[in-house]
Amino acid sequence: MLTSTGSRVAERHRRLGIEACLTKPVKQSELLDTILTVVSGNSRRVAASAPGRGRRKKAARPLRVLVVEDNPVNQELLVQLLKRQGHRTEVAMNGRAALAALEDRGFDLVLMDVQMPIMGGFEATAAIREQEKKNGGHIPIVATTAHAMAGDRDRALATGMDAYLPKPIRANELYEVIERLTGRVIDEKALLEGIGGDTKLLRGLVRVFLADYPRLLARVRRAIKSKNPEALRASAHALKGAISNFGLPPAFESARRLELMGKSRRLRAANETYAALRQDIGRLKQQLRSL
Ligand code: MN
């Protein structure tokens, strides 16, 4: 949490878990510096409790990111955090400007605010997904919204957004979600080495997996729907085994978590993990197809 205050109460704020205090009047540059320090996890309190978590090495692959955001401070924050990872950015002030930018320029990722004038994030996302139905492709869209409520998250995912980041944005969370949505999930070289360099065999494995996984995924979904722990354990285990032919991508971890939920008969978070599994498998599928 960030607050502006006189210095008298600064100590009390620190005790309450407020990580940085600004003295009014606030200069814009000072405000931004403070926000960047806090979200990067570089403030003293955070550094003391979680050493080394703040600064990260640059992203493996520089991306072109479209930042869709009407608030100038949030724009600047996101642009600077992305630059730190070596990404290139462009800013659109609202959903309509985002649609125009996406039309003729190649982006790898969209960070999408929800509340914006002219066209909001949900409407813009629906339009982008509609367009993709005709033209193909799937650009990862991350919702960024101050409405940190469960209903908003569900609505973001239902609208076709791939992930959800509550504001205030934390640098580590931002970098993690980008890595999850854009990072390579399979190591083609290692896969080939594992099967003696036989590209024909690899293609065959991919073909069988792509034909077979929907059935396995449907079994997992039915087990969750009928609240059957043993069926969840068995179906998630089978899916995990099929995925493991392609290394240990995030989909493997999601399937493993569902298997454990079945085993321990605790299905409370199963729906959420299933949603993550579907996304993970979507990314795996995308990359398997491009082999
Ligand atoms: Mn906004």
Image (cartoon, rainbow, N blue to C red):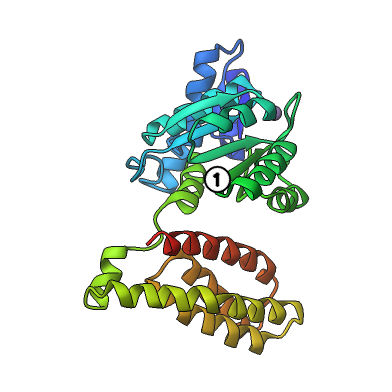
Vertical placement of 223 versus 149: above or below? below
Residue 199, percent from left and from top: 29, 71
Residue 168 is at least partly visible in this image: no
Asked if residue 178 lies left or right of residue 269, the reply is left
Between 54 and 290, which is closer to the camera in this rendering? 290
Q: Work out whether residue 24 can be spotted.
A: yes
Q: Is residue 274 above or below residue 227?
A: above
Q: Nearer the viewer, residue 40 or 24?
A: 40
How crowded pointer 1 is (Cα within 10 Å; few <14, some 14-19, many 20+) is rated as some
Relative height, residue 14 to residue 76 (above, below): below
Q: Position of residue 219 (x, y in %)?
A: 65, 82
The C terminus lies in quadrant:
bottom left
Q: Position of residue 237 (x, y in %)?
A: 53, 83
Which quarter of the image is occupied by the N terminus? top right
- Name the residue located 59 percent from the left edge and 22 percent from the top edge: 73
x 64%, y 63%: residue? 275
Whether residue 53 sits left or right of residue 159 in the image: it is left
Residue 272 is drawn in which quadrant? bottom right
Image x and y of residue 30, in percent: 50, 16
What residue do we see at 54% from left, 79% from top? 212
Mark 1, secondary structure of its residue: loop
The residue that disc 1 covers is 139
Residue 282 quadrant? bottom right
